[in-house]
Image: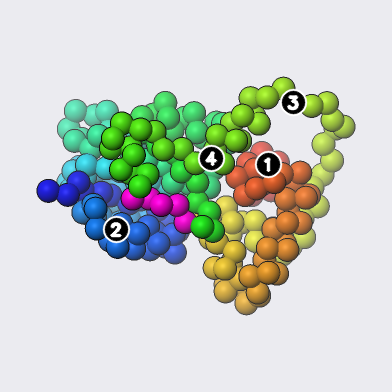
């Protein structure tokens, strides 16, 4: 019998991409796909999936607390893998300590989720290269620099950064704002420059730390 899987993701577009990847892969049986902590909690108890695939930032809770539920005696789910936009050290360490067996980042080029789950079931710990690079960067000695100056993002840049933090791709953001994919990417590059980062993970981390989002 195929292993059963529960998807927990509040961004509808991302959730649909994950559902399609699982269904088209044909390796796992999808027993639920929800966008809230409460709904996920109920399915963990009633549907007893073998694998939990969860985001961290949910509208009514945190995916880390869902992962912690796997240690409860009445929960039979044994494996959990995180898919999120947060790749900073704090989120990664908390998720792994809670019991996550894998940690993947959302990106425009959607990750090969079936392979990652298979690796996890074989005893591996699938982690996105971006997470590993960011952890190395965070753990390296910080270079001396001038005191941080205020970040001046435009209204449009703030709008795009917020959508990026919710997991939307550049193409999806362009469709939502009625602008081209290239225009969105140009704004994203400006955001990176102003926040002194090189990727989405770093931008979200810095913006969160500075209180921008």
In the picture, measured across the screen, residue 97 lies left or right of residue 89, that is: left
Q: Earlier in the sequence, mark 1 or mark 3?
A: 3
Q: Earlier in the sequence, mark 4 or mark 3?
A: 4
Q: CA distance from mark 2 to mark 3?
A: 43 Å
Q: CA distance from mark 1 to mark 2?
A: 35 Å
Say what secondary structure mark 4 lies in: helix
Label at residue 61: none
Q: Earlier in the sequence, mark 2 or mark 4?
A: 2
Q: Observer-nearest residue: 1 or 9? A: 1
Identified at 37% across, 57% down, the residue is 18
Q: CA distance from mark 2 to mark 4?
A: 23 Å
Say what secondary structure mark 2 lies in: helix
Which one is closest to the eye, mark 2 or mark 3? Answer: 2
In the picture, measured across the screen, residue 178 lies left or right of residue 42, that is: right
Where does the magenta region start and end?
110-114
Q: Earlier in the sequence, mark 2 or mark 3?
A: 2
Residue 121 in picture, x, y percent from top left: 28, 37
Say what secondary structure mark 3 lies in: loop
Label at residue 25: 2
Residue holding disc 1: 206
Q: CA distance from mark 1 to mark 4?
A: 19 Å
Q: Earlier in the sequence, mark 1 or mark 4?
A: 4
Image marks 2 and 4: residues in contact by CB distance under 8 Å: no
Image marks 2 and 3: residues in contact by CB distance under 8 Å: no
Say what secondary structure mark 1 lies in: helix
Within the image, what quadrant is residue 48 found in? top left
Residue holding disc 4: 129
Identified at 20% across, 46% down, the residue is 3
Residue holding disc 3: 142
């Amino acid at each position: 019998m195929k292993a059963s899987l529960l998807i927990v993701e509040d961004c509808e577009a991302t959730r649909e991409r994950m559902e399609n990847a699982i269904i088209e892969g044909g390796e796992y049986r999808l027993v639920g796909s929800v966008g809230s902590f409460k709904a996920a909690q109920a399915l963990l108890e009633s549907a007893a999936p073998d694998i939990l695939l969860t985001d961290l930032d949910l509208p009514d809770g945190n995916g880390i607390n869902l992962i912690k539920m796997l240690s409860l005696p009445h929960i039979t789910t044994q494996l959990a893998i995180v898919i999120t936009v947060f790749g900073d050290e704090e989120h990664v360490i908390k998720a792994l300590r809670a019991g996550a067996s894998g940690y993947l980042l959302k990106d425009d080029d959607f990750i090969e989720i079936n392979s990652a789950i298979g690796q996890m079931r074989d005893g591996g710990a699938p982690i996105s290269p971006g997470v590993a690079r960011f952890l190395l960067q965070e753990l390296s000695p910080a270079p001396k620099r001038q005191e941080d100056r205020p970040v001046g993002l435009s209204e449009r840049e703030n709008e795009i950064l917020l959508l990026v933090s919710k997991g939307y791709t550049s193409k999806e953001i362009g469709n939502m704002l009625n602008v081209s994919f290239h225009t969105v990417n140009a704004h994203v590059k400006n955001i990176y420059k102003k926040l002194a980062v090189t990727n989405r993970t770093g931008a979200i981390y810095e913006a969160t730390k500075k209180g921008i989002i």
